[in-house]
């Protein structure tokens, strides 16, 4: 058994690309590999309790990947199956996007109309206990596995929330989660509203159908479309490209650059803007990440949309799933490239700055500081000297309104006003009164607001 386990670990380590230009480099590598094996043998033979070889090896792999950046991770067979099901749009659980932060589970965003959303879980919540069991000391994989369970079974999560004095418990009933990633409706009789909650395999088609339905309902009375990417943690790159393409008629959408040639790619829009130039506003906030930032950055660079809200999360890297094992039932998610907007901007760490900053009202006592990619331990740094490659001055406008129109603090128990949505509707209404030649570039109007 020892030879089989040792051989498997050596084979895994040897499969890693090693850049050894000198004999000394090679010697150092094999010395470190030998050190790892000697430590592993000591753990197996001398640890106070008998250990599971498989678990120890998986922990070593997970530790190696975690040392790279916050988004590289090992996907065990159980977790890999869950990830695949989630990307396909159906899985069992609570309905939250999570990441590990400072030893506890941080909620990136609850998915709309899921048990977590209905129970009141919010983006930014920290889950410290699951059914009374502390999360500290668990891996994200273990925590996610604990939160998943039989449909109809209750689970109690202990939450620490910014602005609340003490942790509190929330009971959630597990359900089969059918991720409806796109929803749409009509606002103010002439504005189309499309919300994307995640980028899974149904998202691109969902947006195209939403546009078709909105145009079918409103026809020539359509004044504009709002694309809501707030609290969207991202997802599949291909779907972000397809969504961007729905609004663009030509030009580059996004490019990726990595160490290997196969990771250097450019994607371009196909002919045909499904809205035929109808004005678009994109809503973003600090929890708009990854694929959401690709869409917002592409539409902003092409001046196809005005971005309103708060600066996005700042995750400008691409993760590839690399299958492992004979049956391909496990994988590593490895950061393999950075992505760039059409103008060449890297969003890593910096995010997409809105054309018009409109911050959502905060509860009294709630901190204004929001954690983004740049705040994550071990994040990849942005090495671009000049983040503004377009040579244009930053366009920012503060919404001038009275306290009653745009409160900075939400009253206790009051339903918060969606000031970002209201501002977007007002802007699109104003744009509808302009000649079509001026609507092509909405930023000058944004500067006047």
Image (cartoon, rainbow, N blue to C red):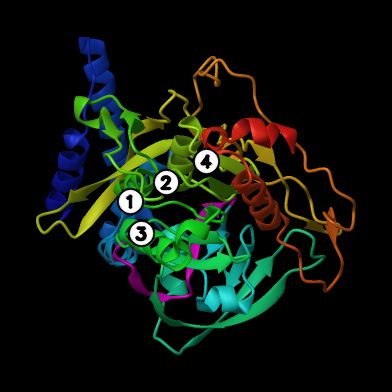
What's the magenta bit mostly, secondary-structure-wise?
Answer: strand
Verify CB contact (< 8 Å) between mark 3 and mark 4: no
Label 3, secondary structure: give it: helix
The earlier-in-sequence mark between 4 and 2 is 2
Residue that carries the numbered disc 3 in the rendered image: 203
Q: CA distance from mark 3 to mark 2?
A: 11 Å
Q: CA distance from mark 3 to mark 1?
A: 6 Å
Q: CA distance from mark 2 to mark 1?
A: 8 Å
Verify CB contact (< 8 Å) between mark 2 and mark 1: yes
The answer to if 104 sits in the magenta stretch is no
313 displayed left or right of 25:
right
Q: Residue furthest top?
A: 22
Residue occupying image coordinates x 36% and y 44%:
273
Q: Is residue 414 above or below residue 439?
A: below
**Residue count near mark 1 (Cα–Cα under 10 Å), binned few <14, some 14–19, many ≥20:** many
Residue that carries the numbered disc 4 in the rendered image: 305
Verify CB contact (< 8 Å) between mark 3 and mark 1: yes
**Which of the two marks, 3 or 4, is nearer to us in this view?**
4
Verify CB contact (< 8 Å) between mark 3 and mark 2: no
Span colored in magenta: 87-102
Residue occupying image coordinates x 22% and y 18%:
26
Q: Residue furthest right?
A: 403
Q: Nearer the viewer, residue 406 or 2?
A: 406
The quarter holding residue 416 reads: bottom right
Q: Which label was assigned to residue 354?
A: none
Label 2, secondary structure: give it: helix
**Residue count near mark 2 (Cα–Cα under 10 Å), binned few <14, some 14–19, many ≥20:** many
The earlier-in-sequence mark between 3 and 2 is 3
Residue 37 point in image, percent of width and height: 26, 40
Residue 392 point in image, percent of width and height: 59, 18
């Amino acid at each position: 058994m020892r030879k089989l386990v040792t051989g498997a670990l050596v084979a895994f380590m040897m499969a890693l690309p090693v850049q050894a230009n000198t004999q000394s480099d090679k010697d150092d590598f094999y010395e470190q590999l030998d050190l790892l094996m000697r430590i592993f043998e000591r753990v197996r033979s001398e640890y106070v309790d008998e250990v599971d070889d498989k678990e120890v090896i998986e922990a070593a792999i997970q530790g190696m990947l975690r040392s790279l950046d916050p988004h590289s991770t090992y996907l065990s067979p159980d977790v890999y199956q869950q990830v695949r099901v989630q990307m396909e749009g159906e899985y069992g659980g609570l309905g939250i996007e999570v990441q590990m932060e400072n030893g506890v589970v941080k909620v990136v965003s609850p998915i709309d109309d899921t048990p977590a959303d209905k129970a009141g879980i919010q983006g930014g919540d920290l889950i410290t206990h699951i059914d009374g069991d502390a999360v500290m000391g668990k891996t994200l994989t273990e925590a996610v596995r604990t939160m998943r369970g039989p449909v109809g079974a209750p689970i109690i999560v202990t939450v620490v929330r910014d602005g609340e004095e003490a942790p509190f418990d929330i009971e959630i009933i597990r359900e089969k989660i059918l991720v409806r990633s796109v929803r749409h409706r009509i606002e103010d009789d002439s504005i189309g509203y499309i919300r994307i909650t995640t980028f899974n395999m149904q998202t691109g088609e969902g947006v195209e159908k939403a546009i078709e339905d909105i145009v079918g309902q409103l026809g020539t009375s359509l004044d504009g479309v709002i694309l809501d990417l707030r609290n969207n943690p991202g997802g599949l790159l291909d779907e972000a490209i397809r969504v961007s393409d729905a609004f663009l008629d030509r030009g580059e959408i996004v490019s990726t650059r990595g160490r290997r040639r196969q990771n250097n790619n450019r994607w371009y829009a196909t002919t045909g803007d499904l809205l035929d130039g109808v004005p678009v506003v994109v809503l973003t906030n600090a929890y708009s990440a990854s694929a959401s930032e690709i869409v917002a950055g592409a539409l902003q660079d092409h001046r196809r949309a005005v971005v309103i809200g708060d600066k996005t999360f700042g995750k400008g890297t691409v993760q590839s799933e690399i299958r492992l094992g004979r049956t391909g039932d496990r994988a590593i998610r490895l950061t393999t490239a950075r992505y760039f907007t059409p103008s060449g901007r890297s969003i890593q760490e910096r995010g997409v700055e809105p054309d018009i900053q409109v911050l959502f009202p905060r509860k009294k006592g709630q901190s204004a500081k929001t954690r983004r990619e740049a705040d994550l331990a071990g994040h990849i740094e942005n090495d671009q000297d000049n983040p503004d490659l377009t040579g244009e001055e930053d366009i920012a406008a503060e919404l001038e309104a009275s306290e009653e129109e745009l409160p900075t603090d939400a009253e206790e128990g009051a339903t918060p006003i969606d000031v970002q949505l209201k501002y977007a509707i007002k802007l699109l209404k104003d744009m509808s009164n302009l000649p079509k030649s001026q609507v092509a570039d909405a930023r000058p109007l944004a500067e006047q607001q």
